[in-house]
């Protein structure tokens, strides 16, 4: 008969059984839940809450610029690269009609937005030329940033310095050369001197005779007096021309140029009628001028004019595409603005003339 197991043997068996049960429980805990079984998956702790106010803005944009080659020579085509690195959610655009004082813009290229992991990178490449020697710089200008909700802001591009050398390529170790023999004949040459003096006197006499003939005998053309065209007539004719071109411009997607012409017509009328330098000012500069009271639009509402200019800026710089009806309504609103101003000005002038006649009549009765 087999001898019974000892206490040590039973302890060893119990230890192996415990290790096996611990391994089985760990394997079961790591096994993913079966979708067919209907058992719920373990819940995960919620992540940190996202602050909805942390939206991308123009302050998150990094802009750098550089000019190459540097130094360069007169007439070389320079590559001016402006790189903008910005977060997702923003759109970076180059405003229409950018001008850089001191350099000639030959061409502009805009690269597509390239993902960088945390955001995007876009490069604007200008082809420039400069025709003056010495130290130079590309002046600062602004890019526009558009948020998803349509808010437009600007980012300042810093100035970039560069140097322009002459066309002459100096030798590494120049040496002074001997003086060359002059090509002119040896002086004094009296015959040549008399010829030169005679030519000078002849030119002076011919000029004097021509002046006397024009002064006493020849009559110049009668000056033509060009009539002054009123600002409202200029604006109406420009609006009629833009109305003819409106459908074709919108069909080819040229809404930015359409609204650029429309705002130029509005600013030209304001400048001609109210003597405000509006053509050379941005919408923000006009707002500051009107708020301070340094300019007066007469019968027009400054709020309405600024609202129209801001809407036009959004279409020009943010590249928002308006419908054909919206474009036509904006043109008619400018036409109504001109008509309203002219009617109010004529009414005010008629009242002032009537009051002046009344004062003159009263003064005549008193003197009599």
Image: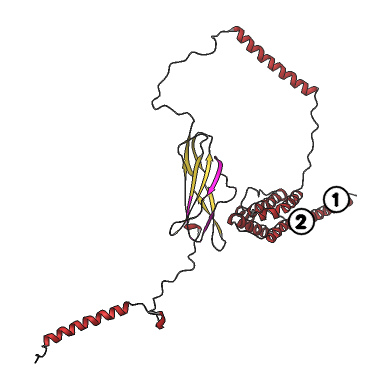
- Residue nearest the observer in this picture, 357 or 69: 69
Magenta region, residue range: 83-112
Rendered location of residue 309, percent (x, y)? 64, 56
Q: Is residue 7 magenta?
A: no
Q: Is residue 289 above or below residue 102?
A: below
Q: Residue at x 53, y 41 (%)?
A: 128
Q: Is residue 95 magenta?
A: yes
Nearest the camera: 270 or 13? 13
Residue 176: give x, y in percent of width and height: 41, 20
- Image quarter (top left, top right, bottom left or bottom right) of the N terminus: bottom left
Q: In the image, which disc is placed on residue 339?
A: 2
Residue 90 rendering spot, x and y as whole percentages: 51, 59
- Please indicate whether residue 180 sits to the left or right of residue 249 in the image: left
The quarter of the picture where residue 148 lies is: bottom right
Question: What separation in Å lies between label 1 and label 2 (alpha carbons)?
Answer: 32 Å
How many labels, in total? 2
Residue beneath disc 1: 360
Mark 1 touching mark 2, by CB under 8 A? no
| Viewer-closest of 271 and 104 | 104
Identify the residue at image location x=75%, y=57%.
340
Where does the image place residue 204, in percent across and percent down from the top left? 69, 17
Secondary structure of residue under mark 1: helix
Could you classify mark 1 by the number of other residues whose Cα lies within 10 Å: few (under 14), some (14-19), or many (20 or more)? few
Q: Residues within 10 Å of mark 2 (few under 14, many from 20)?
A: some
Mark 1 or mark 2: which comes first in sequence? 2
Q: Nearer the viewer, residue 247 or 337?
A: 247
């Amino acid at each position: 008969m087999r001898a019974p197991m000892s206490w040590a043997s039973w302890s060893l068996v119990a230890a192996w059984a415990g290790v096996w049960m611990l391994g089985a429980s760990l394997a079961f805990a790591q096994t993913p839940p079966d979708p067919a079984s209907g058992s719920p998956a373990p819940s995960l702790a919620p992540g940190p809450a996202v602050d909805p106010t942390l939206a991308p803005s123009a302050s998150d944009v990094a802009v750098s610029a550089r000019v190459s080659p540097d130094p360069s020579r007169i007439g070389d085509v320079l590559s001016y690269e402006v790189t903008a690195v910005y977060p997702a959610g923003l759109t970076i655009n180059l405003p229409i009609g950018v001008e850089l004082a001191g350099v000639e813009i030959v061409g502009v290229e805009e690269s597509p937005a390239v993902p960088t992991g945390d955001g995007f990178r876009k490069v604007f490449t200008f082809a420039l030329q400069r025709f003056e020697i010495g130290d130079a710089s590309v002046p600062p200008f602004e890019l526009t940033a558009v948020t998803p909700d349509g808010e437009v802001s600007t980012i300042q591009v810093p100035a970039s310095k560069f140097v322009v050398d002459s066309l002459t390529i100096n030798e590494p170790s120049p040496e002074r050369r001997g003086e060359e023999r002059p090509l002119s004949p040896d002086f004094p040459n009296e015959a040549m001197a008399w010829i030169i003096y005679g030519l000078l006197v002849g030119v002076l006499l011919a000029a004097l005779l021509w002046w006397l003939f024009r002064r006493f005998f020849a009559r110049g053309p009668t000056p033509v007096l060009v009539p002054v065209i009123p600002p409202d007539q200029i604006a109406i004719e420009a609006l009629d021309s833009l109305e003819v071109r409106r459908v074709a411009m919108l069909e080819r997607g040229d809404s930015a140029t359409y609204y650029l012409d429309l705002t130029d017509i509005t600013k030209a009328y304001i400048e001609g009628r109210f003597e405000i330098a509006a053509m050379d000012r941005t919408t923000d500069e006009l707002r500051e001028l009107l708020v301070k009271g340094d300019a007066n639009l007469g019968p027009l509402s400054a709020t309405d004019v600024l609202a129209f200019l801001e809407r036009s800026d959004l279409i020009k710089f943010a590249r928002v595409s308006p419908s054909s009806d919206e474009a036509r309504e904006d043109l008619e609103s400018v036409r109504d603005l001109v008509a309203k101003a002219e009617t109010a000005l004529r009414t005010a002038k008629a009242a002032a003339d009537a009051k002046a006649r009344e004062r003159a009549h009263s003064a005549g009765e008193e003197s009599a």
